[in-house]
Image: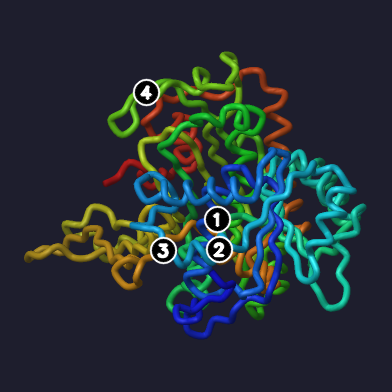
Amino acid sequence: MALSSDTSKTMPPGARRAPACTLVIFGAHGDLTKRLLMPALYNLVGNGLLDDGFRIIGVDRVASSTAQWRDGLAEMMQSFTHDPNAEFHPASINAGQWDWLAQRLEYVQADFSDADALRQLGTKLPGNAIFYLAIPSRFFATVVETLGKAGVVTQKDGAFRRVVIEKPFGSDLASAQALNRRVLSVLEESQVFRIDHFLGKETVQNILAMRFGNLIFEPLWRNEYVDHVEITAAETIGVEQRGAFYEPTGALRDMVPNHLFQLFAMVAMEPPNTFDAESVRNAKEQLFEAVTPINPADAVRGQYAAGTVEGKPMVGYRESPGVSPHSNTETYVALKLHVDNWRWAGVPFYLRTGKALGGRRTEIVVQFRKPPMLMFRETETEELPPNRIILNIQPAQGLTVELGAKKPGPEMDLTDVQARFRYEDVFARSPNVGYETLLYDCLMGDETLFQRADNIEAAWKAVDPVLQAWAKDTAGPEIYEAGTTGPGGADELLRRDGRAWYPLDRA
């Protein structure tokens, strides 16, 4: 089959095809490559966004041939069609689409720290190249430095060289700063694409469109009207087979300085002058600089014990493979943070994330102040319900607005009602793993959805006091039963402020 394609027939209106490029994936045999990157590239082929000169070189230490690697990926892609739990779950695999991609695959066995091997790899890269580090974080700096020694990341003759770095980017402020120093001693900031797959989700990107593209929202988006904001990323799954990774990491490092802070930035940052990369990232940095370092007294950590989740028994975290039976690693964290700027002064932001909970939701709840009760005092209305805007990210995708409305009948009695927008009701849905936009943007050189060094360090600076306090605290996390809404301390965190979480276990 010739290396040609008719994928332009499905190119989205107004989209530009990415330039010819070789994508070098370090960690070719890893789960990230097989479960997320390859499905995302397959979808980009279907949308006609990859140039006919696009190629993929997989690099790993595992002894394998190109044919063996290609066949293994093909088998994995087919398995997704009958795996309802996979993030990529198409009804079928389009043979032409996959063949177009498969013909452009090549495998190279190499040690990540071998400069001679990477120098030899460089001979296969005549033009544009992107190096994707789909590898454990402990190798990030080493691979970047080795690429530098091999001379393959130097940009010349109009060709770009970029490096994509996955999370976690550091494990605390000091390690993030050290990693940035090592990476930026080899690369220019414009060459570094620190990726957070949450930002690839359409519903996350829609936060900016909703806020800044609709005049009815932005005038209310301030402390004069907002009572508080909740940001939740709740999972029903436990640690499963990832105990060895999760044990030294925990919920705070795994989720807060990256995923949750990115959601926080989308909902709280000032309007950028434009949507170019530097304007958006400058607005994020201004927000992060205004965050008061989190008081450890405003942080709650929990760890799940055995319980029942969605009708199925789940072992406790300490009984999971790769986990110490005496582990103090948190699987749940709730935080309160404050923003010391004109827009948000006095408005608390509550963040929570956890595993093995009774509901799976990623959402942002903006709760507004209650209106005066005086005019309703002589009516049947006992209490005015607060207005809320709920940004639904997953599994529901869309927007919910909660309003007070009069119940039918002769009396003036108000109750909560909801107005809902759901993506699936308006837009056609297609299999998507969240990496498609990010990979395309990297090919196009658009850094808007990628984190800058100062953004990374500012987020770690906010949570560092909590990490330091927990490192000295021998009491450990509060135990909560799997399948519940988390530790009682998280409820107390809001209760002492006269507030309560928006229900996690609602229908």
Q: Badge 2: how crowded within 10 Å, few (<14), some, or many (20+)?
A: many
Q: Which residue is mark 4?
A: 307
Residue 85 on image: x %, y %: 39, 44
Instruction: Give the camera-side residue of 433 and 458.
Output: 433
Q: Which residue is mark 2?
A: 101
Q: Badge 1: how crowded within 10 Å, few (<14), some, or many (20+)?
A: many
Q: Between marks 3 and 2, how big is the CA–CA gap? A: 11 Å
Which badge, 4 or 1, comes first in the chain's sequence?
1
Outermost residue, front side = 1
Q: Which residue is mark 1?
A: 38
Q: Between marks 4 and 1, how big is the CA–CA gap? A: 35 Å
Q: Residue at 34% across / 64% down in the picture? A: 401
Amino acid type at image mark 2: Leu
Residue 159, numbered label? none
Q: Between marks 2 and 1, how big is the CA–CA gap? A: 9 Å
Q: Are marks 3 and 1 in contact (CB under 8 Å)?
A: no
Label 2 vs label 1, nearer the camera: 2
Q: Is residue 250 above or below residue 194?
A: above
Q: Which residue is mark 3?
A: 94
Label 4 vs label 3, nearer the camera: 3
Q: Between marks 4 and 3, how big is the CA–CA gap? A: 41 Å
